[in-house]
Image: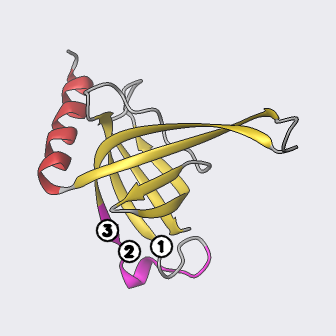
Amino acid sequence: MNGYAKKARETDVKLRKKGGTVTLRRIVLGDDDPDTGKPEQTITEYTAFGVKLNYSADRIDGTLIQSGDQELLLSPLQLNGQPLPEPTAGDLVLIGGVRYAIHNVAKLEPIDIAILFTLQLRGN
């Protein structure tokens, strides 16, 4: 295990202690269903640990960060220890039964190993 893989594991351990489970839901649209005329959906869910935080008032500018937005520090590893796919702005996050849209994603990745994902969440 190289140094960055070890850092990813350490981040996961800290988030497991301080946070809770988070579900990353990815919806991929396929071809149109001939019966409904709507695109078929493939839904894949990944579970990891994360810590949800409120943005401080001085960071809320009403444009990039809006009132009510939340920040999520998300482990780079799933519960099973496998790497978590990189979240995207098209994905959803489920925390405690509440669904959030991912508005922005920042990835801490010194080389090719993600150490932490920081997500901007917006109520959905």
Q: Looking at the picture, which amino acid does disc 2 mark? A: Tyr
Between marks 1 and 2 in the image, the one whose residue lies nearer the viewer: 1
Q: Which numbered disc covers residue 53?
A: 3
Residue at the spot of label 1: 69
**As rendered, which of 115 and 31 lies closer to the eye?**
31
- Identify the image quadrant of the C terminus: bottom right
| The residue stretch that appears in magenta | 52-63
Residue most toward the top?
1
Q: Looking at the picture, which amino acid does disc 3 mark? A: Leu
Question: What element does badge 1 sit on?
Answer: loop
Q: Residues within 10 Å of mark 3 (few under 14, many from 20)?
A: few
Question: What element does badge 3 sit on?
Answer: strand
Which scheme is used to colour this image of the protein?
Answer: secondary structure
**As rendered, which of 122 and 79 lies closer to the eye?**
79
Q: Looking at the picture, which amino acid does disc 1 mark? A: Asp
Res 98 → quadrant: bottom left
- Tell me whether circle 2 and circle 3 mark residues in contact (CB < 8 Å): yes
Task: Measuring from the top left, give residue 63's x and y in whole percent.
Answer: 62, 76
Q: In screen coordinates, is 100 left or right of 3?
A: right
First in residue order: circle 3 vs circle 1: 3
Q: Residues within 10 Å of mark 1 (few under 14, many from 20)?
A: many
Residue 61 falls inside the magenta stretch? yes
Look at 79% across and 40% down and name the residue there.
39
Q: In screen coordinates, is 87 left or right of 79?
A: right
Residue at the spot of label 2: 55
